Image (tube, coloured by chain):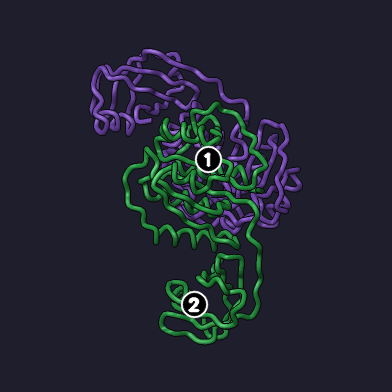
Chain colours: A green, B purple
Amino acid sequence: MDNHFFIDEPNLHTLEYVELSGQEARHASKVLRKNVGDLLILVNGEGCKATAEIQSIQKNSLSLRIQSRELREQPEGKKVLGLGIIKVRDRFEFAIEKAVELGATTICLFESDHSERTRIKEDRLESIIQSAFKQSGRWWKPGLIIKNDLKSVLFEFADHEVLMAHEKKQVEPFTPSLKKEKLLLVGPEGGFSEKEVELIRQAGGELISLGANRLRTETAVIALLAQFLFD
Amino acid sequence: MDNHFFIDEPNLHTLEYVELSGQEARHASKVLRKNVGDLLILVNGEGCKATAEIQSIQKNSLSLRIQSRELREQPEGKKVLGLGIIKVRDRFEFAIEKAVELGATTICLFESDHSERTRIKEDRLESIIQSAFKQSGRWWKPGLIIKNDLKSVLFEFADHEVLMAHEKKQVEPFTPSLKKEKLLLVGPEGGFSEKEVELIRQAGGELISLGANRLRTETAVIALLAQFLFD
């Protein structure tokens, strides 16, 4: 998707002229050496992709004229990934990248009881999400939310079907309900605490198995989301 | 699985005394500072886990006496991952690590038509497999095979049900057969060539979709294997 550029412009579907600035503009002009007259695909992560012609190139921005656009409704289903924060950065970032590719509609990170203390670089995560979003060809970019604990996550997504991956659950396939809004929970390395499991039970959530093997956090994220490829 | 050590000893289930050598021995004595009298879990990747007591520690090896052992039959199903070689090393290695966690019984790498030329470091891949194997708690370590092209892969696993992940396939869930031997094919970045797709069709294989989004190779590997968590 070398030709796709992210633009933070909710009104992309109505505008005739737009400015592309920042890193995306520099990438287009400096790295890909796009020139006046070249066409770019702009995506705004809110259901609009536009083909736009470069009108002029400034130092840190491009002026573009929209030629055509295509719109796509937000998908009906909600797949919220609730992920306990893990410290190992490459695995954590990998999990987030993969969650975008596999169709998570919101990524909600939280301090799980077994999460090790670490500083979340929200800007960096946002840029990983943006890049995976462009790469995956999706129309709606997943949102990023950060919460202090599992309780706050459950409160935020109170109307969702709650499914928690848990390795102590008996190894057997599960049958999800037909509910379109799902909160899929994956713990940090070390898993969820007893208290967190109890919280899920009280909230009417379900513990589910992801097979007989012990999975790392990022693998559990992907395996869990991969159960809902067509929802 | 800090206490698990891999030992390349097919007769672990019959021996009373064994030597642990190389990196695993150094890890036990130097990094984890195990001493005479301490217990280790030895796994041989062929269905045997043994509890063994350290009798003596040499510079590069440990002498151990087996105290007890547990055996597990090889699982009936075969999940062979056939993976087109990709050049980006971290993504390639990640795919292999995850395939082990998710239960692939053999990992068969091959030069796909769109694979970029690169040198395969078999030793390094073997060590990734070993480490993921220990971490995942599996009993049988997946084998590693390298082939020159897709045709040779099909020949090697001629009696398997062939499922090829393909993004041009219509987006719809697929229903696998009940056949216990599966060859799951994932192409390199750039996907399979027309010729390769034709080869699969001729071999009676099936093209399957992994959903509407464009997936990177390593994501497709995990998403595909995650369809068979309980097989």
Q: Is residue B220 left or right of residue A89?
A: right
Dot 1 surroundings within 10 Å: few (below 14), some, or many (20 or more)? many
Asked if residue A3 shows in the view, the reply is no
Asked if residue B67 shows in the view, the reply is yes
Task: Report the label total.
Answer: 2
Q: Position of residue B84 (x, y in %)?
A: 57, 50
Dot 2 surroundings within 10 Å: few (below 14), some, or many (20 or more)? many
Whether pointer 2 and pointer 1 mark residues with C-beta atoms closer than 8 Å, the reply is no
Give the quadrant of the C terminus of chain B.
top right
Give the quadrant of the N terminus of chain B.
top left
* Residue situated in front as seen by the camera: B19 or B68: B68
Please give the residue where the numbered disc 1 appears in the rendered image: B99
Q: Chain of mark 2?
A: A
What residue is drawn where x is 24% and y is 19%? B36
Please give the residue where the numbered disc 2 appears in the rendered image: A20
Q: Chain of mark 1?
A: B
Q: Classify A17 as above or below A94.
A: below
What residue is drawn where x is 60% and y is 29%? A172
Q: Is residue A116 left or right of residue B220?
A: left
Q: Is residue A153 left or right of residue B223?
A: left
Q: Position of residue A32 (x, y in %)?
A: 49, 75
Which amino acid does the dot numbered 1 rest on?
Answer: Ala
* Residue situated in front as seen by the camera: B133 or B200: B133
> Could you tell me how far apart the alpha carbons at marks 2 and 1 are, in whole angstroms?
40 Å
Which type of secondary structure does the marked residue at label 2 adopt? strand
* Residue situated in front as seen by the camera: A8 or B6: A8
Which amino acid does the dot numbered 2 rest on?
Answer: Leu
Q: Position of residue A91 (x, y in %)?
A: 42, 47
Which type of secondary structure does the marked residue at label 1 adopt? helix
What residue is drawn where x is 72% and y is 40%? B175
Q: Position of residue B208 (x, y in %)?
A: 69, 47
Residues beneath discs 2 and 1 located on the same chain = no
